[in-house]
Image (cartoon, grey):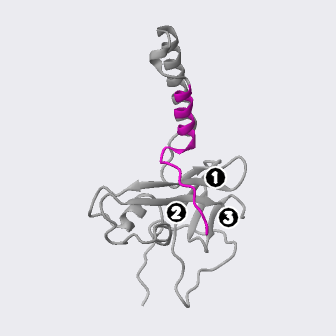
Amino acid sequence: MKTRKIINRWGPTSLAVLLAASLTGPAYAQPASEQAAVSSEATAGAEQVAEARQELPRGHFRLPEQGDIIGEYYTVTVDNPEDTLIDIARRHNIGYEEIRMANPGVSMWVPGEGTEIVIPAQYILPPAPREGVVVNLSELRLYYYPANNPGIVETYPVSVGRDGFATPVGITRTTVKVKDPAWAPPA
């Protein structure tokens, strides 16, 4: 049986700040001068964490210095009774299969208000050059390494070809770009 580590939505960095703040002891037990020093240190520490973390859009991650894992699992609670699991997945940049497999036993169409939903937003980067677009077919995920923003990877859920129209496998290059091309659904 596989186990999953679910990290709260604030992430491990914020937890470290909270833990450090709790280790300083209760403010009422310290002299006023020490309370002010601890308060300013805590504020400075929180600002440093916020700066270091710089919020990125959903699905955008900093490349790890070591290893190939990006993102983290977290949970959300359904607060709108009209939300489907697919609505929640779309808001969190998660694909249909990912959200379904992470939440067995939860109805796709009526998860129910107050239901805790696991968001599986942790990924292993594919073993490919970290440049351009990389599609991991087995994971149904696209990874984009923007040349103008090194150190960042964007990831999106994708679909693959249907029977008889398989998704091509290989290394390709874009040779022509056409803005707003005409397109009509095939027969």
Frontmost of labels 1 and 2 is 2
Q: Regarding mark 3 in the picture, which secondary structure is present there? A: loop
Three-letter code for the amino acid on which mark 3 is drawn: Pro
Rendered residue at 26%/64% (across/down) = 82
Q: Secondary structure at mark 1?
A: loop
Determine the image quadrant of residue 122. bottom right
* Image coordinates for residue 127, horizontal then vertical, percent: 72, 64
Task: Name the quadrant of the N terminus.
Answer: bottom right
Q: Quadrant of residue 182?
A: bottom left
User: What is the quadrant of residue 28 in the picture?
Assistant: top left
In three-dimensional space, the C-alpha distance between marks 3 and 1, rounded to whole angstroms, equals: 18 Å
Q: Nearer the viewer, residue 10 or 141?
A: 10
Residue 157 at x, y percent in the picture: 51, 66
Mark 1: give few (<14), some (14-19) or many (20+) Cα within 10 Å: few
The residue to which callout 2 is attached is 156
Residue type marked 1: Ala
Task: Pinpoint residue 65: horizontal percent, then vertical percent.
Answer: 71, 46
Q: Is residue 136 left or right of residue 163?
A: right
Residue appearing at x 55%, y 33% in the figure: 19
Nearest the viewer among 71 and 183 is: 71
In the rendered structure, which disc, 3 or 1, sits on the residue that comes first in sequence?
3
Using the image, determine if residue 127 lies above or below residue 72.
below
Q: Where is residue 130 shown, x and y percent of the image?
A: 69, 58
Residue most extreme to the front: 29
Spatial CA distance of label 3 from label 2 is: 13 Å
Q: Are marks 3 and 2 in contact (CB under 8 Å)?
A: no
- Magenta part of the chain: 1-23
Residue beneath label 1, please?
147
Q: Which residue is mark 3?
A: 126
